[in-house]
Image (cartoon, rainbow, N blue to C red):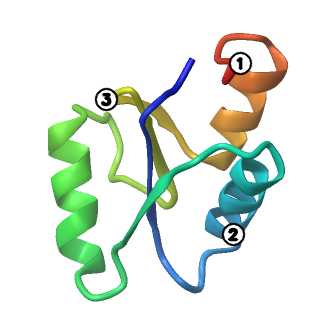
C-alpha cells in the first residue's frame, strides 16, 4: 500500500527532525514542505485547512489527505496500529 505522506516542517524543530527520521527508518517516502519562509502564514493556513481547534504546530503530518497531527500523534497512532504503511 502506497500512502501519500506530506510533512510541514521548520528547520529548527526537533520534532520535525524526529518525524523525518521515523519515515526514513521505515523507508516511507514523504514530501517535505518547509514553512521556514512563512511560518506564521502557514500556521494559520494549516489551522483553517484542517479545521484544527488549536493554532497549528510543527510538524503537521498529512497522510492520504488527512491530518494526523504531529510527531507524537504519528508514533502513538503507529504503535496502536491506527495507521500502517505496509
Which residue, given by chain and number where applicable, does mark 3 sit on? 65
Where's the C terminus, which quadrant? top right
Which disc number belongs to residue 86?
1
- Label 1 packing within 10 angstroms: few (<14), some (14-19), many (20+): few
Residue 14 location in percent, x, y?
70, 73
Question: What whole-number distance in Å separates the C-alpha atoms at marks 2 and 3?
Answer: 21 Å
Residue 59 location in percent, x, y?
51, 58
**Res 85 → quadrant:** top right
Q: Secondary structure at mark 1?
A: loop
Is 1 rendered above or below residue 73? above
**Res 53 → quadrant:** top left
Residue at the image point whose x is 74% and y is 56% from the top: 24
- Label 3 packing within 10 angstroms: few (<14), some (14-19), many (20+): few
Q: Secondary structure at mark 3?
A: loop
Is 12 rendered above or below residue 16? below
Camera-side residue of 62 and 31 = 31
Which residue, given by chain and number where applicable, does mark 2 sit on? 17
Is 25 rendered above or below residue 49? below
Q: Are marks 2 and 1 in contact (CB under 8 Å)?
A: no
Camera-side residue of 35 and 3 = 3
Amino acid at each position: 500500500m502506497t500512502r501519500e505522506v506530506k510533512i510541514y516542517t521548520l528547520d529548527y524543530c526537533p520534532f520535525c527532525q524526529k518525524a523525518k527520521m521515523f519515515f526514513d527508518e521505515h523507508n516511507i517516502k514523504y514530501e517535505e514542505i518547509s514553512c521556514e519562509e512563512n511560518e506564521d502564514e502557514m500556521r494559520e493556513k494549516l489551522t483553517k485547512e484542517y479545521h484544527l481547534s488549536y493554532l497549528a504546530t510543527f510538524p503537521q503530518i498529512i497522510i492520504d489527505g488527512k491530518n494526523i497531527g504531529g510527531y507524537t500523534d504519528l508514533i502513538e497512532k503507529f504503535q496502536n496500529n491506527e495507521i500502517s504503511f505496509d
